Image (tube, helix red, strand yellow):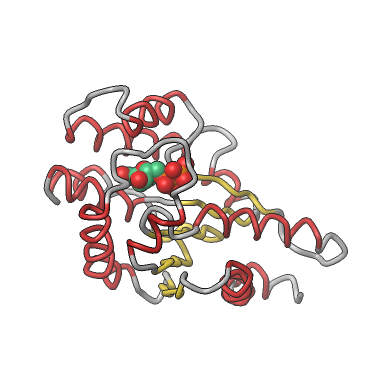
Amino acid sequence: MILQNFVVFEGGDGSGTSTQIELLRRRFDSCRDRALPALFTTCEPTGGPIGAMIRRFLRGDLPLRPETAARLFAADRNEHLYGSGAVADRCGRGELAVSDRYVPSSLVYQGLDCGEELPALLNRDFPLPQLLLFFDLDPETALDRLEGRPYRDLYERLDFQVRVRERYRALLPAYASPGTRLEYLDASRPAEAVAEDVWRLLQELPIFGSRNT
Ligand code: TYD
């Protein structure tokens, strides 16, 4: 099933998905005069209680079995999607929802951690986005970009990120369908250049066409 008006950004750690969401938000805010749809930007793990538990796991403060983590990510996603005022509600109301990470993150990261079967099962019934953007960046450059941060998350290691990129490349093509557009962006370019591509691709979504902007 495809969720209309739903867009997902994916990529390895440090590939710039959060920066791009922020640039998109600013661009929307600066275009108030145009008849743009309302923009809902969001992320996984969420800021909710399950997301908070996941963050503790990612920081190394909460030891969990990989299977437990896979279940938490899926539970967090269920709230993110179906909780009141969450993604499905917003999309249904004609807002454009853009999420920093979604199902592919679980298939890639938890797939590497606990095998493919469980994440595939846990995430089988979630709807697919209309547009899936993959921010492709070599893991060394990506991790260099995270250098200034005060902490390193569990998955922010070069050996793991090399495998993450490989898994994304292997898994993503299966998402392309008549209902889901899959695009790869070269995330090694300056953020503004990448943001131009994001903007152009978003404009091609039906939600923009129906507004004649
Ligand atoms: P990230 O977007 O990097 O957050 P931040 O910019 O705040 O560090 O996401 C946090 C980590 O969570 C990242 O390493 C990927 C991981 N993750 C999973 O392993 N599975 C998932 O299902 C999701 C959504 C994220």
Residue drawn at x 37%, y 25% is: 53
Residue 43 shows in this picture: yes
Is 99 situated left or right of 166 in this image?
right
Where is ligand 1, by quadrant? top left
Res. 177 image quadrant: bottom left
Q: Residue furthest right?
A: 33
Residue drawn at x 63%, y 53% is: 22
Res. 154 image quadrant: top left
Residue drawn at x 41%, y 36% is: 151
Image quadrant holding the N terminus, namely: bottom left
x, y percentage for residue 114?
13, 42
x, y percentage for residue 6?
52, 58
Above or below residue 98? Residue 59 is above
Residue 81 shows in this picture: no
Residue drawn at x 60%, y 75% is: 193
x, y percentage for residue 78?
39, 37
Res. 58 image quadrant: top left
Depth check: give the residue in front, 140 or 84: 140
Image quadrant holding the C terminus, namely: bottom right
